[in-house]
Amino acid sequence: MVSSRVKLINESATVSMSNKAAELKAQGKSIYNFGIGEPDFTTPARIIDYSYKFAREGGTHYTPSAGIMELRQKIADKMKVKNNIDISAKNVLVTPSKFSLNLALYSIIDPGDEVILPAPYYVSYTDIVKLNEGKALITQTDENYEFDFDQMKKLVSPKTKVFMLNNPVNPTGKVYSEKSLRQLSDFIIENGLYLISDEIYEDLVYKGRMFSPGSIEEMKERTITLSGFSKSYAMTGWRVGYMVASEEIIKASNKVQQQTLTCAPSVSQYAAIDALDDEDDVVSMRNIFNKRRELAISLLREIDGISFYEPEGAFYIFPGYSMNKSADDLSMELLEKENVIVTPGDPFGAAKHFRISYATSEDVISKGINNINEYFKKIKN
Ligand code: PMP
């Protein structure tokens, strides 16, 4: 029998959709897939070449558990320059990003401790909290996804330990302003909480400016900043990212890493060393995403029956609708009738919403959103 801890967590929300999509593909249908949460690009060739060279030279062994020192140092330098967080290599742990979310919670919460999540949240957060025996407290945000501090004040109890933020946000594409993040930081300090700041989409900001709350002096010790190479450098399959925190938290997380993962994959760490010198590819991929974002926004605006926040970052749009239908049913109908895959909003903490990932070609965006438009027209008639 599996443990009660594992029984509590869910499988990926998109399994039945993927099965259905595979069935339709086997029937020869073209599927317009907006379900994918990863860049469609292949990792830039120079990064692959660099990693290959090190692999050929013998870099295929265990590395120190916290990561190769040269990489930790380079990440520390990047944090100083890009995020305005003045730290040393000792404050860096190299680990896959989703694992770092687990390490962070495992290191700072005890069973029953509470974790505040502003909704809509990244789909894995609630399950990661459960897996680490915490309790998720959901706080709703307003129509522009700004924080509701009155609601948050009412939620907090002596058991509340962490506020978990993703910025830019998956699934809404929201990028929080420095002002909002300073207000959030005041709330965190006043209530003696930790902040887990998941900044994995930090390089995919098209409007506004990225601000890292860990750069605020009084937040430094209580912020765990997470980022990685998956989204910025199209490196999802390399499984490499990092956590930046106080030495105490890094040491605790490193102990857990030693007894679980041992270390991040060596070849991926070498790739990451080169990636940090490859700003050109980040900029060119961001420009392509931005063109797709503008195209998707303009096409979605033409659809009667949906409304959405215009995203400033990441590669998602999160339309809402008012008709009386669950997002699961709507998504399945979009697939069956219009060959379009979207992700239902409920697992992100938002009913009557669906997520569109525009990390796909302009052709798919045009044809797929046209089909979504057709669906809404037919429903109305
Ligand atoms: N955080 C967020 C908000 C994400 O969207 C993702 C990936 N979808 C992750 C963390 C995990 O990233 P990785 O695949 O690099 O572990």
Image: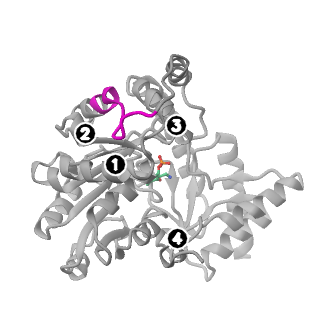
Label 3 to label 2, Cα distance in Å? 21 Å
For disc 1, the marked residue is: 226
Say which amino acid is labelled 4. Answer: Pro
Q: CA distance from mark 4 to mark 3?
A: 25 Å
> Going from the N terminus, do you reach mark 4 or mark 3 first?
3
Q: Could you say which quadrant of the image residue 15 lies in? A: bottom right
Does ligand 1 reach within 8 Å of label 2's beta carbon?
no
- Front residue of 128 and 117: 128
Spot occupied by residue 131 in the image (x, y as percentages of width and height): 44, 69
Residue for badge 4: 347
Secondary structure at numbered mark 2 = helix
Image depth: mark 3 or mark 2 in front: 3
Residue 131, label in figure: none
Q: CA distance from mark 1 to mark 3?
A: 16 Å
Q: Quadrant of the C terminus?
A: bottom right
Image coordinates of residue 8 in percent, x first then y, are 50, 77
Classify the position of the N terminus by image quarter.
bottom right
Q: Which of pointers 1 and 4 lies earlier in the amino acid sequence?
A: 1
Going from the N terminus, do you reach mark 2 or mark 1 first?
2
Q: Amino acid at mark 2?
A: Asn
Question: In the image, is the residue at mark 3 within 8 Å of ligand 1 by its beta carbon?
Answer: yes
326 with respect to 260 (left or right): right
Q: Is residue 21 visible?
A: yes
Nearer-the-camera pick, 22 or 93: 93
Q: Which residues are magenta?
A: 62-73
Q: CA distance from mark 2 to mark 1?
A: 12 Å
In the picture as drawn, the residue positioned furthest to the right comes out as 27
Q: Which residue is denoted by mark 2 in the rendering?
A: 83
Q: Which residue is mark 3?
A: 235
Which amino acid lies under the numbered mark 1 shown in the image of this protein? Answer: Leu
| Residue 361, horizontal then vertical, whole percent | 65, 40
